[in-house]
Image (cartoon, helix red, strand yellow):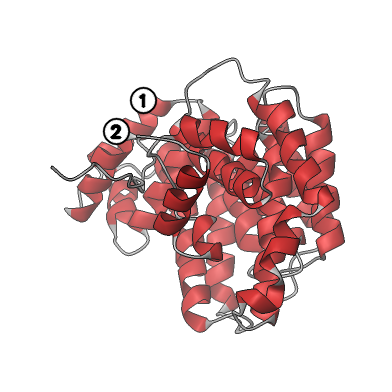
Amino acid sequence: MARDRFAPDYDPDCGDAPLTNARHDIVIGRWQGLRDLLRATGPDWLARGHRVRLLAQACASSSTVESWLAAEPHSGDALVLRAATETARAFNLAIAAGRGVPIDQHRIDTAVSACLQAAEAYLDDPTPWISLISVARLYSSGVRRQELSRWWDELHQRDPYSVEGHLQVLHYYSARWHGSHGLMYDFARDAAGVAPTGCALPVLVQYARVEEYRYALDAAQGSQSAVGLGQHWNHDGAVSDVRRTWQRWIMGRTDGGVAPGELRDLNYLTHAACNAHVTDVAATLLRMLGRRATRTPWSYTGDPDQQFVRWRKELKLRG
């Protein structure tokens, strides 16, 4: 009998079974499952943000959210999902157009208006503000600093330790969008520095390192050898950052389980630990992940399957 080989499980919903069921409803144009899911999620902002983001990606190519709003025009949940969906649609247009090619500003304005309407309809929810900050970077010149600061304050008041919210600001401040490597890293380190023990915000530094790598990869026209992969990931600063995030986040966690909304963050730290050759941390993180995986950030540095198998073999992990 052949040996059972390790294979990562790239569940797009990160193990969130109720979300998977709701996404199946989108395929048949049934909106009631979305309503029931978001109603049951309530003010669990980590789970809600994860679910809204993935539902929006699925709704972007359908009219399901519009059908829900036609039936329940005053539903706060429907308006929040519509805002995230319009944001996803705007990003889909930007991806299709290609980097550096502007899209119709009216489409961005439509998403911004939907976000502001959702924020007014569901006052406590940070999710519309996350969508708003996200879509703001599609404006060719960004938005006024005062505007971004105001939106950030609204988000921060509602969920001060939102990784997704911080991540959208980090992207905005990156050199690929409207900032610089220095501005991006300063934001990530400042956020990590004030995060309470056990909070995932220190992983923003690992997100920033991936963002810097992607910028360098674009400049090198996709040649990883030209970027200097090893030097980028395993210099002294990168190693120290991995250990700092490990200590502040993972060692401070009180819950042993990995929530679906945390899985991508854990993959980013695991990827960083492996490539920095911090083997003790990498081995523990790979055990925490088991077969649960996200394609990013692994896909930026090669074939995700091959990397998982290689690192597990090097670290002598089984099963």
Q: Which mark is residue 18?
A: 2
Figure check: 239 above or below 87: above
Q: Which mark is residue 310?
A: none
Figure check: 145 above or below 127: below
Locate residue 289 relative to residue 183 in the image: left or right.
left
Numbered disc 1: secondary structure: helix
Query: Do tag 1 and tag 2 residues touch (Cβ < 8 Å)?
Result: yes
Kind of residue at badge 2: Pro
The residue pinned by badge 1 equals 40
Q: Residue at x 63, y 69 (%)?
A: 138
Locate residue 225 relative to residue 69 in the image: left or right.
right
The quarter of the picture where the N terminus appears is: top left
Locate residue 248 relative to residue 38 in the image: left or right.
right
Residue 143 screen position, x and y as percent: 75, 65
Number of numbered labels in the structure image: 2
Q: Residue at x 82, y 43 (%)?
A: 189
Disc with the residue nearer the chain's start (1 vs 2): 2
Q: Which image quadrant is residue 155 in? A: top right
Kind of residue at badge 1: Ala
Of residues 227 and 111, the one drawn nearer to the viewer in this rendering: 227
Residue 33 screen position, x and y as percent: 25, 38
Of residues 239 and 36, the one drawn nearer to the viewer in this rendering: 239
